[in-house]
Amino acid sequence: MQPRTVAIVLAAAVAHAVWNLASKYKRADTVLFVWAYTCASAVLCVPIAIALMASGEQALDWRFAAGAAISAALHLAYSLTLQAGYDRAELGVVYPVARGTGPILTMLFALFLLGERLTAFAMLGALLVIAGILVTTGNPFRVGSRRSLQGMMWGTATGATIAGYTLWDSYAVTSMHLAPVSYYAGTLALQSLILTPNALRRRHRVRAALRADVVPIVVVAVFSPLAYMLVLHAMLDAPVALVAPLRESSIVIGSLLACRLFGEDHLVRRTVGAVVVLVGVAAISL
């Protein structure tokens, strides 16, 4: 992989960690927060998609509509589950567990439902991810560790949603031949539309929510699509099998910053666990 491509993927990892840290700073209503940053991201990305469609890169047909609709539902499940986890547990637990279990669940789905075969290296990677998760969370079943157990459960649930949208988005781009940038922008627009009726029912809280979370909303709205676009760009120059594990370096970045910014404890243990998860994800991808 060229140094320039490595730099792009690492920048994507930093952007991904940054927007997750901003999500943890959220103070007001969860649904309104997700609705606000999704709408803002759509405002930024949809004009780009329109320009690409005008140039003929992507046709606005039933395949595009169906693909984006299913992706929007899966991404909404991911966003709301992740945010619920951050509301109830520490980012230093939820984030690495979510990012680690996503690849494992994707692999298991491919194994049992798609009939793919696993290499010994992939099996080793899966075991490393599980070990890294246990190191990161500590013993979630010990007395007085209810918060760690919650973090592991919400992280695992988030990982399941990651596996869901990863599998579908891969199918949409590779089998349905949807242009990634236009497809992503369409997904954002539909997510905004799906959440708008719920936001209207809470309209008496919208102003207060926006005022309380304006900085996190802006950060997530900018850095979330930025991370995605950087990864897409890197995939033009390098195999997904190399880009994907390098991107998961965000696990280490997120764990370190969570201890620094939120005063979360067990810095050394969580860093070691995050690195083990990263190595496991790399083994699965290779």
Image (cartoon, rainbow, N blue to C red):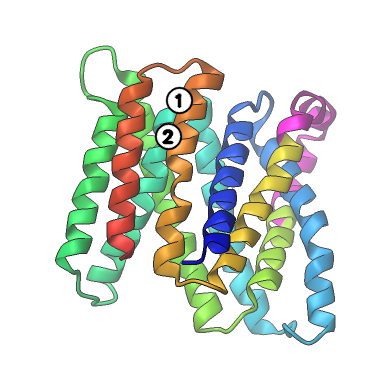
Residue found farthest to the top: 144
x then y, percent, for residue 44:
81, 56
Let me know if residue 144 is in the magenta part.
no
Q: Tell me the number on the disc at residue 30.
A: none
Left or right placement of residue 184 versus residue 133 in this view: right
Q: Which residue is drawn at 57% across and 43% down?
A: 14
Residue type, mark 1 in image:
Glu
x then y, percent, for residue 203:
82, 35
Viewer can see residue 35 = no
Foreground residue among 237 and 180: 237
- Kindly indicate whether the residue at mark 1 contacts the one at mark 2 (C-beta within 8 angstroms): yes
For residue 23, which quarter of the picture?
Answer: top right
Foreground residue among 210 and 264: 264
Q: What stretch is highlighted in magenta?
A: 194-216
Task: Tell me the residue that label 2 is attached to.
Answer: 94
Let me know if residue 209 is in the magenta part.
yes
For residue 112, which quarter of the picture?
Answer: bottom left
Looking at the rendered image, the quarter that the C terminus falls into is bottom left
For label 2, the SS is helix
Left or right placement of residue 190 versus residue 164 in this view: right
Foreground residue among 194 and 36: 36
Above or below residue 160? Residue 71 is: below
Task: Tell me the residue that label 1 is attached to.
Answer: 90
Above or below residue 220? Residue 138 is: above
Label 1: how many Cα within 10 Å (few below 14, some 14–19, many 20+): many
Compute the Cα span from label 2 to label 1. 6 Å
